[in-house]
Amino acid sequence: MRGPLFNQDSTEFFYTHGPDEMSGEAVDAWVDGLAEAGVGTLFSNVNAMKTNYASKVWEPDWHGYDPAAGDDQPVLRHDVEGGAAGTRRAAKRSSRVWRMAERHAEQRREPIE
């Protein structure tokens, strides 16, 4: 490992990037920017209970999220202390994580040229 080490919460990208930036290319650019700033090793919440990517082994972060259902969803109620503001934060992040996964799935269905 090279330093400096940067231990980043895996949800930070989804809070700081807009819905139109939910793509693998945007993640690559974000990581490249960290490297250009001098980060030698990036850790992204290695102890999370859910993934920010589709997995056959782990439950993804957006499991149970319905983009058409609004803020009144069980998956968005984990920030009890945050109240309505916490639910809105969770909805913002969940909609972006869900959108990233949706775009990735769409890309995989494209024919290989």
Image (spheres, rainbow, N blue to C red):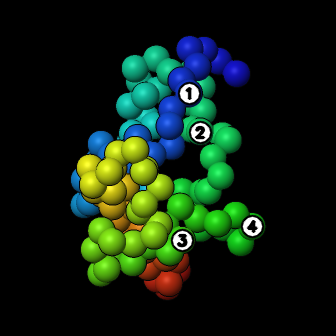
Element at badge 4? loop
How far from the left and from the top, in percent, is residue 54?
A: 59, 67
Helix, strand or loop at label 2? It is loop
Q: Amino acid at mark 4?
A: Val
Residue behind mark 4: 57
Q: Amino acid at mark 2?
A: Asn
Q: Is residue 83 visible?
A: yes
| Mark 2–mark 3 CB contact (< 8 Å) | no
Q: Report how many numbered discs are placed on residues in the image.
A: 4
Tell me which label, 2 or 3, sits earlier in the chain: 2
- The residue indicated by pointer 1 is 7
**Residue at 24% across / 60% down in the picture?**
20
Q: Tell me where residue 50 appears, x and y as whole percent.
A: 62, 56
User: Sequence order check: which comes first, mark 4 or mark 3?
Assistant: 4
Q: Earlier in the sequence, mark 2 or mark 1?
A: 1
N-term-proximal mark, 1 vs 3: 1
For marks 1 and 3, give the one nearer the viewer. 3
Report the residue marked by disc 2: 45
Give the structural element (helix, strand or loop) at label 3. loop
Residue for point 26% across, 49% down: 85
Give the crowd class for mark 3: few <14, some 14-19, many >=20 residues within 10 Å.
few
- Mark 4, residues whose alpha carbon is within 10 Å: few (<14), some, or many (≥20)? few
- Residue that carries the numbered disc 3 in the rendered image: 63
